[in-house]
Amino acid sequence: MRIIADLHIHSKFSRACSRDLTLENIAATCAIKGVNVVGTGDFTHPEWFKEIKDCLEESEAGLYTLKNFQFPISNFQKNSKFQITNSSSPRFILSAEIACIYSKGGKCRRLHIVVLAPSIETAEKINLALSKIGNLKSDGRPILGLDAKELARICLEIDERVAIIPAHIWTPWFAMFGSKSGFNSKEECFEKLSDKIFAIETGLSSDPQMNWRVKNLDNISIISNSDAHSLPNIAREANIFEIEEQKISYDEIIRIIREKNPQKFLETIEFYPEEGMYHFDGHRLCSVSFLPSESCQQKNICPVCKKELTIGVLNRVEELAESDRGENYVDKSRVPFRKLIELDKIIAECLGVKSRRAKQVQVVYRNLIDNFGTEFNILLDVSTEELKKVAEPIIAEGIARVRAGRLKIKPGFDGQYGEIRIFSEEERSSFQKKLF
């Protein structure tokens, strides 16, 4: 069976994250989107961990479901063809993100690391060990003055099945390969424990093909997760596995990631990397953004304020890539991927509405869910002809264009998301005229 998994999200206890990120709301959102496995996020936070222990029960080895989960069907039309019950409740996997800030090699290092634990008992032991190093109560993503290799050592000594995954590895400020505080190789970062690091996370501003260009990542699995700070962003990036229903477990998911067999690790779902906040170089306050070649011409200095540019993901990939692996390099042995845009964002763009949360957007979204079951079913599986029977032609065409990559994107830079356009104003007007 197809399993869609988002292994890295946050809770209401993380800074700059929505208060709506409760276990019940996360479960309901995953049911609507079609996510089968989701990270708990933030298991290091004492209050959140208490909620995890109180509200979740083990369903399969290392996977948990919400006790007495009731899908809030009142949010949707009562005549929905698809009723979601406890049997389709998403599974939770114990996950946390930890910020390691430390000095190494004469440079301040700031890395975010995703930790996946095989059980509540293991997570509790990790929390006890880390609580002796820093304040876990201060933030759902705790900041520890701890070398990344030491974090790995502590976790793996507690349980060798723990997964240590460098998060959004190209982000300038907080990542293993980040331009501001990162390293040039996995070995430089994790030293003798580097062989224990079997996966990295792409982040929103890169896709797997960009990572294939870097030889240091040739033998490592590439996964993608949402790092969601709010409910709508859950599964904006995700992983798709093929797992027999009777075999689903924490260990099986980790085995599939490790082995990176495309027959079991089917694909990853990606943001269009140009939409990510750090794809190009630039200065947001100066409204300056550059391709790597343009930054080079400027000697990485902002022409407006004369300060150093924030060097983005594309530039950093170019720096670490092999000379014979250009931007079109493809490794056919690797797990494939596809780029998507969240359904409510597609609808908003098609309707010419700025907010994905606008009422008219949500009416269309709910109607599509009522007819086709889940957001991923709509984005991945439902034919354009079937979509046209339920939604306006412009919505069906918008989904088709996203699948085909027929978009115009103004790339993001220095913490500012890129801007995606599916239709020009003329095209949108043409669709409206045909409708009336």
Image (tube, rainbow, N blue to C red):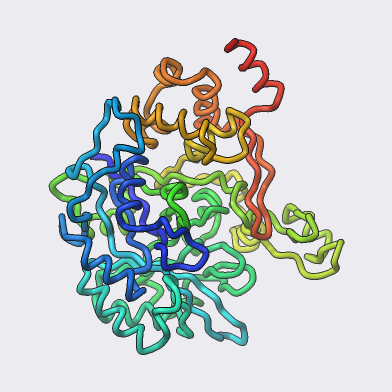
Residue 389 seen anywhere in this rendered image of the structure: yes
Looking at the image, residue 421 lies above or below residue 219? above
Is residue 64 shown left or right of residue 106?
left
Residue lying furthest left in this view? 246
Q: From the viewer's side, name the closer residue of 144 and 162.
A: 144
Is residue 12 shown left or right of residue 350?
left
Q: Residue at x 75, y 54 (%)?
A: 289
Residue 43 quadrant: bottom left
Is residue 423 shown left or right of residue 160?
right
Relative image position of residue 80 (x, y in whole percent): 30, 27
Relative image position of residue 260 (x, y in whole percent): 34, 52
Is residue 134 shown left or right of residue 121?
right
Q: Residue at x 51, y 19 (%)?
A: 392
Relative image position of residue 181 (x, y in whole percent): 60, 74
Q: From the viewer's side, name the closer residue of 128 and 272.
A: 128
Q: Quadrant of the C terminus?
A: top right
Exactly how many numbered labels are in the figure? 0
Looking at the image, residue 4 lies above or below residue 44? above
Looking at the image, residue 231 lies above or below residue 426? below
Q: Residue at x 32, y 54 (%)?
A: 38
Residue 321 quadrant: bottom right
Relative image position of residue 81 (x, y in whole percent): 27, 26
Q: Quadrant of the N terminus?
A: top left
Residue 251 seen anywhere in this rendered image of the structure: no
